[in-house]
Image: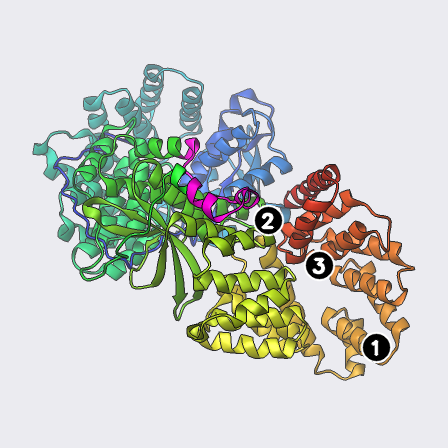
Amino acid sequence: MGIVSEAVGYRARRALQICAVLVFCCASLLADQTNKTRVGLLPFINLSGQTNLDAWRKAFGDRLASELEEAKPPWLDVSHSKVLTALTSNGWDGQQVVGAELAAKVAHELRLERLVSGGYNRDEKGWQVEVRITGPGGDSKEQVLIFKEASSQDLFSAMAEKICAALGVVPNPKFKELSKRYRVSNEAMDKVVAVARARECGVSNEVIIDGLRAVLATEPNYPNARVALMDTLFESKRPKEALAEARKLMKLAPEMCWGYIGVAVGLSGSEADEEREKACLQALKVHPGCPSAAGLMFPVWASEGRWRELKPVARQAHEDLPEEPVSTAALAGALAAQGEQEAAGKLLQELGPLDDEQGPDVHGLVLLAAVQAKCIAFISRELLWLHRCGMTNEYARNLVGEMDASFWLSYPPGLTTTNPLPRLFSSPELAAELAKRLTPAEQSLVENPLEVTEAITAEARGLTAGLTNSTLKAAVLFAAVIEQRLQSEHQSTNTLQPGPLPVCHQYASRLVALARSIGLSAWLVHVEFVSEAASGYHDRAAIQVQDGQIIQFDPSLGVLGDPEDKYRMLNDVQAIAHHLLQVEDLPKVRVAQKLDPEDLWSRMVIVVRLSTLAQVDEAETLWKALPPACTNRWDYYFGRAAIELHRSHYGTALSWLQQAEALSPNNPAVHQALGATYSALNEHAKAAEHIDKAIKLGAAQQNPGLKADLMSQMQFRRDLAKAGQMTEQELRQQAAAGNPGAQMTLVNVLFERGDNDEAMTMLRDGANKGNSLFQENYARNLLMLSKGAAATEAADWLRKAALQESTEEACYLLAKILYTGELVPKDEAEASQWAHVGEARGGKNCHALLKEMELLADSAAFAQGKQRAQAILSKKSG
C-alpha cells in the first residue's frame, strides 16, 4: 500500500556530522536472506478473446500483489513487477503466453519458490478465473483454484483469500472490510484498469488525469482511483492539486494510509514539519509498519539525530513489519545511539543487502544506522551505493561529500600493527629482486597476485572518483570486493557454476591491488586462526589510511581484521611465494621455496604439497628439518600425516592427525583428512562424523562440487557403519531392499572370503542401476581380476561413472589408462578431457596428471580435451 514519491525522502535539512570510530569486532555483511516465501505472479492469460479485456492481464498481478503482500503473518515476498522485468529481459514481448520453460527460467533467476499464474474469461454472467500455484520447476506441487464472481471487487476478495490459504497465510482482513465498505461498479474498475494500461503505453499524464477525474465524477468514493489521481498529479508536478486530493482521501478513507502519505508528501517548508510528522504517525497507526510513512519520516529524524524519539516508533514499526528495511535500519540506529551495539548489529545483519528499488534516502538511513552501530561492512556497502548514485542524485552526492570531509576509522587504543612495515617494491625493483633469486625459467613461473594492471587501475579510479579521504576510498574499495564476492557466490548458487569459487587469498589480493592502484600503501596479510568457532589459514588486506594508521580489511568475512590475531604482513616477494603455494604445482612450489625459505607456514605447506605431488621423500627431509618450535603447531602434525597417507600408512597417519586435531579442534582441513583416513581404515562411523564436522566448519565452502561429494561420502559412510553391525543375512535383506551401504559391505564380505563371482555380480547390478560408486568399483575390479583383458569394458563403466558429478576418482583412473595406453588404446585428447573434468570437481590426482600432460602430451590433443571438458561441465551446470 501507499504511493511512491521522492519529494520528501531525499531532503537533508541539517548537515550530517559523521565521525565514525570503528572497533574491529564489526558485524559481517550477509548475503541476501529472507525468511519469507518468494512468490512470483505471472501475467494472466485472456481466455475470452475480447480485446477490451487485454488490459486486465497485468491488472490481476498488480492487484493480487498488493493484497498478498499484506498477508498475516508477513511470510510472502511477492514479486510481480520483477517477474515482468525478468520476462522481458528473456525475450518476452508482453503479449505472448509465458511458457513453462520461460517461467521456470525466471523463477530460477529470481529464486522464486512458488509461481502463481492463471487465465480469465468474462461474459454476461461475470468472471470465470482459473489460478494455478506451482513450484518453480513445473507442476510438482500444483494447486488449481477456480473462481466465478459477477463483481470484479468480489472476485479479487475471493482470490486473495483462497490464494493466501493455499500458500499457508491469512489475508489481511482489512481488504475484505474495505471491499464491503467501498463498493465499486465493474464499469469503474474497467475504466481504471484501462487508464493503467494507457499509462503503460505512454499516454500523457494529462490524458490519465482526465480519465481518472471522469471515473471519480461518477464514483467519488472509489479510493484506488483517487490514489491514482493523486500520484499522477504529484508526477506532473502539480503539488497543490495533489495535496487537495490527499486531503479528500483522508476524509473519504481515514482508515487507509494513502491520504496521510499524500499530505506528508505534499506539504513543504519547515513550518509544515509538525503537520507532516503527524500525518506520517497517523499513517503508521492505520497501516501498522507502513513502509511509505517510515520512508518519509525515519530518514529525516535520523539525519537530525533524533534517535531517542525515533526508537519507540521504529520499534513498533519493526514489530509490525519485521523485514521492512526502513524500520529495521531506523531501529538499529536508534539502539546503537543509546548503547545497544550488539542488538543493533544483529538487526543490520538481518537486513542484508537492500532491494534495488530502495532510494538514496533509505540507503542514507542504513548508512547512518551503520555508523551508529560501527558496522564497517554496512558503512562501506552503503557508501559505495551512494557514491555511484551520487553521479545523478544530489542528495546522495551531498551525503557522500559530508562523509568524505569527516570519515575516519580506528582500532581501539593500544592495538598496533607491524612496525617497521614490509617493503613495497616498485615494478623495476621487484623484477630486479626476482632476477637475483630465480633463474629465467623460474621467473617465467612467477605470478604476482598484487600486480596493478590498467584494468584494475581503471576500476579503482572509477569507484573512488571525486573522493579525497583515504579511509573513505579504502572503505569503498573494500565494499566493491565484497560485492564481487557476493555476486560470485550468488551466481554459483543460482547457475550451479562448476568448479571452485575464489577464496580469501584472491579477494584479499584484489583489494590490495585496487588500493595500490590509486596510491594507497597496502599489503597482503596472512592470518592463522585458532578459535572456538573455526581454525586454519586465512588471508586479508592491510591498507594505510590517514595519519599513517594501518587498518586490516577482511573482504571474505566482511569485517575489519582483529590486530590481536596471529598474523604476518607480507612484502611483495613473500606475497608472490604465498600465492604460488595456493596450488599443487611442483615447479611453482620449488619457486616459492626459494622466495620465502624461512617462513614456517610456507615450509609446512611445502611439506604437504610435496607429499601430494608424490615427492614424499623430499617432503620427509624438509619435515625433519623443521625447528623444534613447530611442535606446538597443528600443521606440523598435519604435514607428517600427509607423508604417511601418501605411503598408505593409515594407522600412523591417524595418530598424527589426532595430534593436529588436539591443537586445532575446529579445523576443517584436519577433519576432512580424518574422514578420509577413517574411511581407508573402514571405520565408517568415525569417518562420517569427521566428514560432517568438516562440512559444518566450511570445508569445500568455495567448491560446490566438492561439497556435494563430501555430503555423498558422509551419507555412504553412515550407511556402511549401520551395515557393519549386521549379520550376513541382515546384509542380504538390506541389500535386496536397495540399501547401498549394505550392498557395498556385502560385496566386501564376499571378496574377503573369495566369492569373487557373486561380488562382481552385485557390483554389476549396482552399476547397471546407475550408481557411480558401483560403476567405478566394478571397473576397478574388472581391471584387477581380468589382468586387463576386460579393460575396454572397464573403461566404458568408468566413462559412465565419470559423467556423474561426485566421481573425480573415476575421472582420474579413466584419464590415467587412456594417457598411458597400457590397457586401452592411447588417447591423449580423451585423457585430457576426463582429467580436466576431475580437476574441476576437486580431484587432486587429476590436477597432478594434468600438470604432467601439460609438459609431455601433444598440445593440440591437450587443448582439445580441455574444450570437451568445458562442454561436459557446462551441460551439467545447466
Mark found first going from the N terminus, 1 or 3: 1
Task: Relative to 594, say whether 600 is above or below.
Answer: below
Q: Dot 2 surroundings within 10 Å: few (below 14), some, or many (20 or more)?
A: many
Give the magenta range. Answer: 431-456
Q: Dot 3 surroundings within 10 Å: few (below 14), some, or many (20 or more)?
A: many
Whole-percent x and y of residue 500? 56, 50
Whole-percent x and y of residue 696? 50, 65
**What residue is drawn where x is 38% and y is 37%?**
356
Q: Amino acid at mark 1?
A: Leu
Nearer the observer: mark 1 or 3; the answer is 3
Q: Is residue 681 left or right of residue 335?
A: right
On residue 786, the disc is none
Q: Amino acid at mark 3?
A: Glu
Tell me where residue 182 sits by quadrant. Answer: top left
Dot 2: element: loop
Mark 1 = which residue? 750
Name the image quarter holding the N terminus: top left
Name the image quarter holding the C terminus: top right
Mark found first going from the N terminus, 3 or 2: 2
Q: Is residue 57 left or right of residue 203?
A: right
Whole-percent x and y of residue 425? 36, 43
Q: CA distance from mark 2 to mark 1?
A: 37 Å
Q: CA distance from mark 3 to mark 2?
A: 16 Å
**What residue is drawn where x is 18% and y is 60%?**
413
Q: Is residue 159 or residue 187 the one in the foreground?
A: 159
Mark 2 = which residue? 499
Dot 1: element: helix
Magenta-span inclusion, residue 562: no
Q: Amino acid at mark 2?
A: Gly
On residue 809, the disc is 3
